Amino acid sequence: MHITNGYQIYSLSDTAITIDWGNVIDEEINNQVQVLFQCFQQQKKAFIRDVIPAYSSITLVYNPVTLWKQGIVTIDTYVRNYIFNVMQQCNYTLATEESPIKIPVCYDASVAPDLEAFCRAKQVSVEKLIKLHSSVIYRVFMLGFLPGFAYMGTVHDSIAMPRKTIPAPQVAAGSVGIAGKQTGIYPFTSPGGWHIIGQTPEAMFQQNRKQPALLQPGNRVQFVPIDVTTFHSLKQTLIP
């Protein structure tokens, strides 16, 4: 896979530069972001502090002092040339697509405070919503907002819905929501503006795990409906 055109490179600050394909949710562009992320990771350059992939952009955070100590005066130009060279040479082939990660979800009003109102607004039955939401294999486009919060897409057009005008002051950990054409799972109890249609007993983030966040960019995810009894039973065993 080669990195395609249609991007711009700009300084985000005096220690960060962003490569941006535009404000879009596009699987092909996100594939390019993930490929480029891995190419930069493989470089292991001492002056690169962090590489941050998003939906359709990737940001490199660098240490100008490290470059200055090497005698580099035009630091911004040096970093831009480095980025350009990596992008030209990057031909990293993504690993074979793995099987979807299956996440159990209870679509019951007792654990999904917005479920019934959402169904009324979209003019679908709860059963239809469950079928539409759980029949899609979603792509994890990026992590953000909270540690382990995976932005996934895209939901079926008939259940896409804008974020709430007024966010809820408290959304339970494990809540599964929809915002626009995205779906996601709240890893911690927090305020939130997504429409909550279900809840999973899975722990989305555990600090003591080797990989604290259960989901990573590029993962594929499928939701598996469970009843409320199974939900409470699994929650006792899955959440420490």
Image (tube, grey):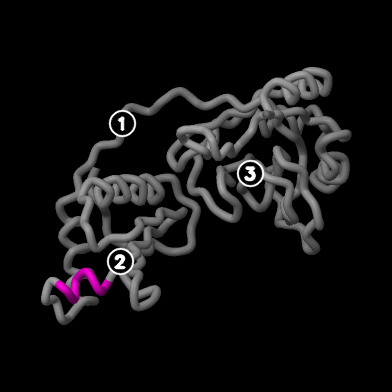
Q: Say which quarter of the image contains residue 133.
A: top right
Please determine whether, in this image, residue 171 is positioned above or below residue 84: above
Looking at the image, residue 70 sits to the left or right of residue 200; the answer is left
The type of residue carrying mark 3 is Thr
- Which residue has dot 2 on it? 62
> Magenta residues?
64-69
Q: Amino acid at mark 2?
A: Tyr
Q: Residues within 10 Å of mark 2 (few under 14, many from 20)?
A: many
Q: Nearer the viewer, residue 39 or 94?
A: 39
Task: Determine whether, in the image, residue 180 is placed left or right of residue 4.
Answer: right
**Which of the image's four quarters has the N terminus?**
top left
CB under 8 Å between discs 1 and 3: no
Q: Which of the marked residues, 2 or 3, is nearer the chain's N terminus?
A: 2
Task: Please state the horizontal and vertical placement of residue 32, each as a whole percent of the image.
Answer: 33, 49
Residue found at x 80% / y 63% = 166
Q: Quadrant of the C terminus?
A: top right
